């Protein structure tokens, strides 16, 4: 470890180290790797000084840094991972030395993970505990008997390599379990920089795989990705003053400022980019580990069958210039990327169609040598892109492989602005770029519903492309879509359709859920925007694919039914039919009449609240137990302020009005020969999916009408306590 003379202190006590440490962390001249190196060096010197002062003549004992500290990756609030290694000759002296080392660390409030072991004990514990073994792989000598430390390092590394066929599958399972618990870093709004998939733990696991000599991780960009995550963690520690790895929303702006970045979105984008590199490297590495282990298991039997000869991997053709080998899509020996600009798309489409990973070596070679496509694209290139997009779930991994080597941004330059772009909306599960691919995956399952699957798939890929630009992303996206579609080689009519789909990709769901579908003007406006039945057909499928790819909260059977109802009405208008005039009000139901009489009798509001039954066959109606919506029927004596009061109460209970009707209902002559009440029949949706209590709803409405409930104040208090 490089020493830092400018911060070295002769005071081996806690106060001297603390002052030097504080000075180092507060100076603005150093950050990132230089500061981590300096902090580790300063800590090394302090601990070595403590060791020497406590045991100046000790033999057969050494102080060893392991884990993150062993790697020299000390963040401002990192704990210290230490092992006091000894030969077992004087346990009492070792125990006394341990106290003189550990207590000064604790006195400073620094977290300490410590152990006291002989080399044999350390090896035994490592053999029983994978996490201990991983920490010892990074063992680094600090003080004392250098030979003792070197012997342990040699033994631990030899054990790791000898046990790799058993240990690496355990490590892979450990990484998978951690990813299941903490999620994927590059898609989380509040990611854990260490534990989430693609985080620092995964980067450390890749180092361990490389140390096994069984397989190696792709190294391109990996060190830089790790550095970016460590830099973000350093800034997070400095901003919060805590040893935390979770990048909480309320701290992101400060962390961005600490790193000299423009804003929190820029920070998240950098973090997501780093996590993407680590995740992809992990996917490739674990695939290679499993391939090697399978080959080792099969090779003895195969060699015996071949009479001792070396087995030759079979190659099966997939497409021109592309073959399958060892469970991957690789380039054929005759492939010439430098002469075949369509090869990257052809290889990707073939891999996705065969549900095979695309070899990273093939992708790297194509990225380095393939010629750019001409503009407009030849028909084959466009067809291969559409085949790739229509391949379903395998498209995602193949797209990621192209993305890892920068091929996507070369094929579609506008993609660069949406790469790893965060979406600060809890409804969205993905970054913008991943959402676009997920939408294409969803759209691939809907292609039989439309007459032009190619336009549906390309619209799915481009519908949010405008999110990389300021202003309304649908408007910006329309302009970009026209340009991209023309470059892809679509004719003028298809370019117009794609631009319309991108411009209006939110039109159906927003109209269906926020407007009155019984209003002829509403239906006519949608028809005018869409223009044709074929475009409406595509827009309907795109709307569903977009919502399904957003997340579970964005689509439901209820929303789907509203959109389908709107599409049916718009289709009729486009076919030449005219929206009918307003129907005559239906006769009141027995329940409506009962509510009206009760409202007249009590002089206050009376309501009924119920979930709507799911339409369709019983097996569909049971799906997810999801109601179509909530029907709210209210009878109230006519008085000023009824509608504002009701709207405020619904907002207070987080109920969103989808459709509504208001009419005056005359009371039966035997009740009041000249009386009437207002009858409101509204369809509402509960924001969190649960039905509110009718009694609470009525009580708040009564108070709102008599002025004892200040709706605006209550809403302000609620929003302050539970910000969205």
Image: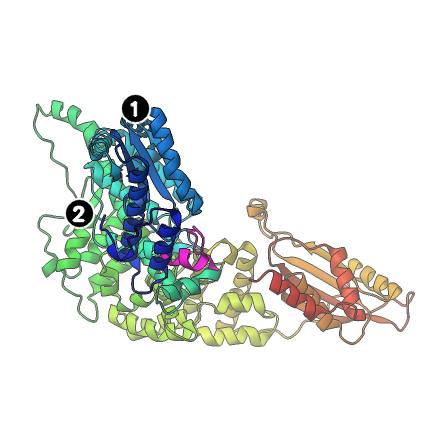
Q: Position of residue 541 (x, y in %)?
A: 43, 61
Q: Depth check: 395 or 557 in front?
A: 395
The C terminus - image quarter: bottom right
Q: Depth check: 512 or 14 in front?
A: 14
- Quarter-of-image position of residue 501: bottom left
- Quarter-of-image position of residue 517: bottom right
Q: Position of residue 408 (x, y in %)?
A: 25, 61
Q: Position of residue 386 (x, y in %)?
A: 29, 59
Residue 284 shown in magenta: no
Above or below 153: residue 30: below
Above or below 222: residue 606: below
Residue 236 shown in magenta: yes
Per the image, the residue denoted by label 1 is 88
Where residue 548 is drawn, which disc sits there?
Answer: none
Q: Closer to the N terminus: mark 1 or mark 2?
A: 1
Query: In the rendered image, is residue 295 in sight?
Result: yes
Where residue 330 is drawn, which disc sits there?
Answer: 2
Check whether the beta carbons of the residues at disc 1 and disc 2 lie within 8 A of each other. no
Determine the residue positioned at 49% across, 58% down. 427
Left or right of residue 253, residue 712 in this image: right
Left or right of residue 558, residue 373 in this image: left
Q: Position of residue 624 (x, y in %)?
A: 55, 47
Determine the residue positioned at 35% across, 66% down. 462
C-alpha span from label 1 to label 2: 55 Å
Instruction: Report the magenta residues as a range.
Output: 232-249
> Closer to the observer: label 1 or label 2?
1
Q: Depth check: 352 or 285 in front?
A: 285
Left or right of residue 648, residue 555 in this image: left
Left or right of residue 11, residue 581 in this image: right
Q: Secondary structure at mark 2?
A: strand
Query: In the rendered image, is residue 460 in sight?
Result: no
């Amino acid at each position: 470890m490089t020493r830092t003379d400018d911060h070295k202190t002769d005071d081996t006590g806690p106060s001297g180290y603390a002052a030097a440490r504080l000075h180092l962390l507060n100076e603005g001249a150093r950050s990132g790797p230089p500061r981590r190196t300096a902090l580790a060096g300063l800590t090394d010197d302090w601990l070595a000084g403590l060791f020497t002062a406590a045991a100046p003549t000790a033999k057969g004992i050494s102080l060893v840094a392991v884990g993150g500290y062993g790697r020299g990756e000390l963040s401002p609030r990192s704990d210290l991972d230490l092992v006091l290694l000894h030969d077992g000759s004087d346990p009492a002296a070792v125990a006394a030395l341990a106290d003189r080392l550990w207590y000064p660390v604790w006195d400073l409030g620094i977290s300490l993970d410590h152990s006291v072991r002989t080399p044999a004990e350390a090896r035994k514990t490592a053999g029983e505990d994978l996490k201990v073994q991983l920490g010892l792989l990074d063992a680094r000598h600090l003080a004392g008997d250098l030979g003792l430390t070197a012997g342990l390092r040699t033994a631990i590394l030899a054990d790791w390599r000898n046990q790799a066929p058993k240990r690496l599958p355990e490590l892979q399972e450990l990484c998978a379990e951690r990813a299941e618990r903490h999620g994927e870093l590059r898609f989380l709004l509040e990611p854990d920089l260490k534990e989430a998939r693609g985080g620092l733990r995964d980067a450390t696991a890749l180092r361990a795989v490389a140390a096994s000599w069984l397989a190696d991780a792709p190294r391109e960009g990996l060190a830089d990705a790790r550095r970016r995550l460590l830099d973000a963690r350093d800034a997070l520690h400095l901003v919060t003053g805590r040893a935390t790895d979770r990048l909480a929303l309320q701290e992101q702006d400060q962390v961005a400022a600490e790193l000299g970045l423009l804003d929190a979105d820029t920070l998240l984008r950098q973090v997501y980019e780093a996590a993407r590199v680590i995740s992809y490297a992990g996917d490739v590495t674990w695939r290679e580990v499993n391939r090697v282990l399978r080959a080792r298991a099969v090779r003895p039997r195969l060699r015996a069958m071949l009479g001792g000869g070396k087995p030759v991997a079979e190659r099966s053709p997939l497409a021109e210039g592309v073959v399958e080998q060892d469970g991957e899509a690789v380039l054929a020996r005759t492939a010439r990327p430098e002469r075949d600009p369509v090869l990257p798309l052809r290889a990707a489409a073939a891999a996705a169609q065969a549900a095979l990973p695309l070899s990273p070596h093939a992708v790297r070679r194509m990225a380095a040598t393939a010629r750019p496509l001409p503009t407009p694209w030849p028909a084959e290139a466009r067809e291969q892109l559409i085949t790739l997009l229509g391949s379903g779930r395998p498209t995602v991994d193949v797209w990621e492989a192209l993305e890892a080597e920068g091929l996507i941004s070369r094929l579609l330059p506008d993609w660069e602005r949406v790469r790893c772009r965060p979406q600060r909306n809890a409804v969205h599960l993905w970054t913008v770029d991943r959402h676009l691919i997920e939408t294409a995956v969803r759209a691939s399952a809907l292609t039989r519903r439309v007459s032009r699957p190619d336009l549906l798939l390309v619209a799915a890929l481009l519908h949010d492309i405008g999110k990389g630009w300021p202003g309304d992303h649908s408007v910006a996206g329309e302009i970009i879509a026209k340009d991209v579609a023309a470059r892809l080689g679509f004719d003028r009519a298809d370019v117009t359709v794609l631009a319309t789909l991108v411009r209006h990709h939110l039109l159906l769901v927003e109209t269906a859920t926020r407007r009155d579908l019984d209003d002829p003007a509403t239906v006519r406006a949608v028809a005018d925007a869409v223009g044709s039945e074929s475009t409406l057909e595509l827009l309907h499928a795109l709307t569903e694919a977009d919502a399904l790819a957003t997340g579970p909260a964005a689509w439901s059977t209820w929303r789907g039914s509203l959109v389908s109802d709107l599409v049916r009405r718009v289709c009729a208008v486009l076919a030449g039919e005219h929206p009918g005039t307003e129907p005559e009000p239906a006769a009141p139901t027995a329940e409506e009449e009962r509510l009206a009489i009760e409202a007249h009798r009590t002089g206050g509001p009376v309501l009924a609240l119920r979930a709507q039954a799911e339409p369709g066959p019983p097996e569909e109606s049971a799906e997810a137990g999801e109601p179509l919506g909530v029907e709210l029927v209210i009878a109230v004596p006519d008085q000023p302020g009824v509608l504002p009061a009701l709207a405020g109460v619904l907002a207070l209970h987080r109920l969103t009005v989808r459709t509504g009707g208001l009419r005056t209902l005359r009371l039966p002559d035997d009740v009041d020969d000249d009386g009437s009440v207002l009858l409101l029949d509204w369809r509402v949706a509960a924001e969190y999916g649960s039905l509110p209590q009718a009694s609470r709803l009525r009580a708040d409405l009564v108070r709102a009408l008599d002025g004892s409930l200040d709706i605006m104040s209550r809403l302000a208090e609620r929003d302050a306590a539970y910000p969205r």
